[in-house]
Image: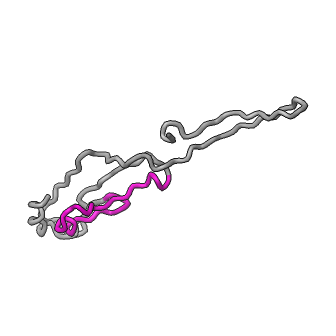
Amino acid sequence: DREKKAEFVFTIMAIDIGGRSGFTRLHVVIGDMNDSQPKFLQSVYKAVIKDDVTTGTIVAKILAEDNDIGDAGKVTYEVHSSTNLETRTAFAIHNKTGELSLLKDAHNLGSIFSYL
């Protein structure tokens, strides 16, 4: 498990038939596989949206981390497809930053809160 120990370093010895020897150090780096799931920094995120907030305003920032390295550790965000259509058309989340923004002016959001 790379997250527990990412590298091993040890000495290698080579001996010839005459008894002469040489030494080198070997560094073994453990590659990563996608074995960690993203974890949100908070268990619940809340946003208070005033009625005068306009389209495009960022109302929350969602943050998650993944202990994998490289591409396996990159986190992207999206509104899940199981979310009702009215909510999906009212909010957008930036796929890289996790910023949640309004796709409608706040005064037009009233009807969706019966679905949340």
The image shows residue 51, relative to residue 34, as above or below, that is below
Number of marks drawn: 0
What secondary structure is the stretch in magenta mostly built from? loop
Q: Residue at x 39, y 55 (%)?
A: 75
Q: Nearer the viewer, residue 47 or 16?
A: 16
Is 39 covered by the magenta stretch? no
Outermost residue toward the front in this view: 17
Outermost residue toward the right in this view: 18
Q: Position of residue 60 (x, y in %)?
A: 25, 56
Q: Position of residue 42 (x, y in %)?
A: 28, 45
Horizontal side, residue 10 vs residue 70: left or right: right
Which quarter of the picture shows residue 27?
A: top right
User: Dividing the image into 4 quarters, which one contains the C terminus?
Assistant: bottom left
Is 84 covered by the magenta stretch? yes
Horizontal side, residue 2 vs residue 38: left or right: right
Q: Position of residue 15 (x, y in %)?
A: 83, 33
Which quarter of the picture shows residue 49?
A: bottom left
Q: Residue at x 48, y 56 (%)?
A: 71
The range drawn in magenta is 70-98
Q: Residue at x 17, y 69 (%)?
A: 105
